[in-house]
Image: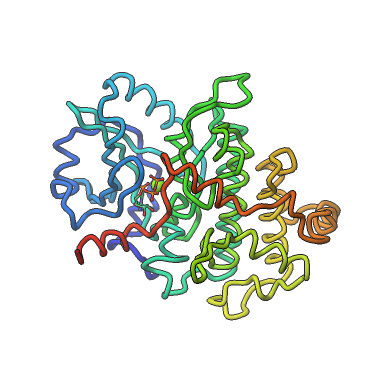
Amino acid sequence: MLCCGKGTNRSELGKKQQTWRVFSLRELHAATNNFNYDNKLGEGGFGSVYWGQLWDGSQIAVKRLKVWSNKAEMEFAVEVEILARVRHKNLLSLRGYCAEGQERLIVYDYMPNLSLLSHLHGQHSAECHLNWDRRMSIAIGSAEGIAYLHHQSTPHIIHRDIKASNVLLDLDFQARVADFGFAKLIPEGATHVTTRVKGTLGYLAPEYAMLGKANESCDVYSFGILLLELASGKKPIEKHAAVKRSITDWALPLVCESKYDELADPKLNGKYVNEELKRLVLVALICTQVRPEKRPTMPEVVELLKGISKEKLSELENDELFKAPHAADYNDGTSIAEDSTDFISEERDSKQELKEENEL
Ligand SMILES: Nc1ncnc2c1ncn2[C@@H]1O[C@H](COP(=O)(O)OP(=O)(O)OP(=O)(O)O)[C@@H](O)[C@H]1O
Ligand SMILES: [Mg+2]
């Protein structure tokens, strides 16, 4: 089977999940060839990620943090260990950490098929690995992972940065949601956590961008954007001439006119299941309604995507939202998001960024 990332060995990946442990800085230096530029997978808001190989041959991804470099060793260890306990088939679990001197690093399993972003808009987009079945399974799998974070993990976790680069793909193209570790942990009983806005332009729920109020429904909004991206292959915000258009503003009128075929990613060459595409897009749009109380919960999203209840699907289809575009229920979120550039980054394919850096 063709893999997009570094060479890999199926039997090694098929092994039981590795146990959690503390890594020494020396070991991580050796694994990543001293954090060599050639090993760099990309750079995000918290630091750089490097590919590495341990002495036993297993492949890892090491996130070298910049933001938390001053966090005390003990405090860092406690926080990371809480996250390490969160395990689900669709979450990228932590394999370990290193806290020595000023260095704070987190170790994950390396995901050979990289991120959804690299397949939709990045270095692997021309290869067309994402057929319809894979897209549907990525949609349902990542929804299950987020539903687990919201409702089953202890403590409950709001992700706060759901986007295509944070959905990684394993050898079988199953989704693994990454970076939930950087979310604020919700204390029991609290309804929301107010925090500085962290997120990525195009995925931010309007109320989060404006008020910095993070709760589960902000993740639902971002997930809706991700679903539209997965179905259409379009970016959350696209530029046409000087005008920016959000993916929701583009999709809603097409749904109201039942033009589903225009919503499908042209790279699918018409090979998709009509009913599933329709379901995916309808769910995406109810997730991205401006009023948070109108959005479904993640377990409801999972149920709708799976198409379990015919009744609920027909209810969804007959939702007022799809009768005609409602200005009040929809805005593109861009004008708000652009004002809050503090801590907001525009999503780009990391390898592309590295390439551009190289060309300078
Ligand atoms: N375990 C992994 N296996 C393979 N690629 C990974 C792994 N972890 C991260 N990456 C890739 O490395 C790059 C950098 O990741 P990083 O999380 O630092 O940035 P990001 O996802 O773009 O933004 P953010 O900081 O908001 O999460 C991304 O392209 C990401 O998909
Ligand atoms: Mg990330």
Colour scheme shown: rainbow
Residue 73, horizontal then vertical, whole percent = 26, 22
Q: Quadrant of the N terminus?
A: bottom left
Q: Residue 221, image x and y in percent?
A: 62, 46
Total of numbered circles in the picture?
A: 0
Residue 28: x %, y % from top left: 19, 41
Q: 214 or 82, which lies in front?
A: 214
Q: Residue visible at 17% across and 47% down?
A: 35
- Compared across the picture, whether 171 is left or right of 153 comes to left
Pick whichever, 152 or 331, lies toward us.
331
* Horizontal arrangement in the rendering, residue 191 relative to residue 21 (left or right): right
Instruction: Give the quadrant of the C terminus.
Output: bottom left
Please tell me whether residue 102 is drawn above or below residue 237 in the rendered image. Answer: above
Query: Is residue 75 left or right of 236 when viewed as pictured?
Result: left
Q: Residue furthest front?
A: 242
Residue plotted at (69% across, 40% down): 292
Q: Is residue 218 above or below residue 124?
A: above
Residue 255 in the image, given as x and y percentages of width and height: 74, 66
Q: Residue furthest bottom?
A: 269
| In this view, 184 is above or below 217 | above
